[in-house]
Image (cartoon, rainbow, N blue to C red):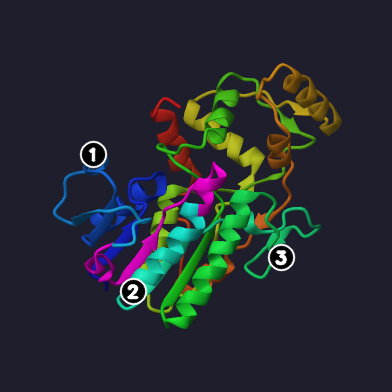
Amino acid sequence: MINIVSIVGASGFIGREVVDYFIENKIIVKILIDSQSKLLNFKKSDYIICYEKSPCDEDIPIEFFESDALINCFGSINGISSIYRNNILVPQNLINQGFKKIKKIIQISSVSVYDFEDNLDIIDENSKISPQNIYELSKAISETIILNLTEKHNIKCVILRPSNVVGANMKNNSFRQLINLVKKGIFFYVHKDDYISNYLNVKDLANAIFKCSILSNANGIYNLSDDCTYKKLIGIITKSLKIKLRKKILPINIAYLICAILKLFRINLLTKSRIKNLTNKKRINIRKIKKEIGYEIVYGLEDAVSKIIKSNL
């Protein structure tokens, strides 16, 4: 069993959940925050040790790295300079400063690094890497940097590739918008209702990080997702909202026509990316992490949807 972990990006959506998860399991957590005001984001706890530093700084105290695992939840999804600095330079900076003390690093990446345009319906850890935008490219590059540096310094390394992470405090509004469409009775399927949704409860991600921290055999790259059909997902949402929804299916060509018309009026109710998500055929295979460390989905999307709805969307 481990006694202490170091967490970078602790004040973010994922990081806060991870901090709480370790504290609940009575593990001491060292965190980096660039402002004392961010401590207000955390419950008062004797299990938190705070270092007022940014992960971009070149003088992070060496004591911060003295733990059983370094967990990097830090990153950006918008802004080229922020993405480059936070997703690529920060992991490199952390390892370069702390390599003499780091025992294991757990890096949060994303399934978005994979090729979602090929004809295969299953994505596993050996699937083709094909980033399509700056964010996805930054995740792929950071993985390569971390794998090379950890091998060079003989540090254990775990890279987790979760699907779309959802929870009450998430900044990404697309999942909230989906729930709102269902709530207002204006959600419709595109073409059919059995396409695949790739989402993951943030608490299930925190649980995976916890297990990868405490288990010595956790090593390498692991996918994480709680896949289900959109029919099942919409059923979870309607159950939590306590409403009934009449099923509406829109032909795919009509969906793209509506999308084009709405774009003229700068209305983001239906976008090409949303149509792409609603017609996704790919499942994320998580057999590897189940087999190697005994991981299972514990909390599920029902829990995430319920908490999002209770947070007033």
Residue type, numbered disc 3: Lys
Question: What's the mark number on residue 128?
Answer: 3
Q: Which residue is mark 2?
A: 102
Quarter of the figure with the N terminus: bottom left
Q: Quadrant of residue 31?
A: bottom left
Question: What's the mark number on residue 127?
Answer: none
188 or 34, which is in the foreground? 34
Closer to the chain start, of discs 3 and 2, is 2
Disc 1, SS: helix
Q: Position of residue 23 (x, y in %)?
A: 24, 55
CA–CA distance between discs 3 and 2? 30 Å
Count residues near mark 3 (Cα–Cα under 10 Å), then give few for <14, some for 14-19, many for 20+.
Answer: few
Disc 2, SS: loop
Inspect this view and state whether residue 309 appears.
Answer: yes
Q: Position of residue 299 (x, y in %)?
A: 43, 50
Q: Residue at x 55, y 52 (%)?
A: 226
Q: Position of residue 64 (x, y in %)?
A: 25, 65
Residue type, numbered disc 1: Ser
Magenta-drawn segment? 60-84
Residue type, numbered disc 2: Ile
Closer to the chain start, of discs 1 and 3, is 1
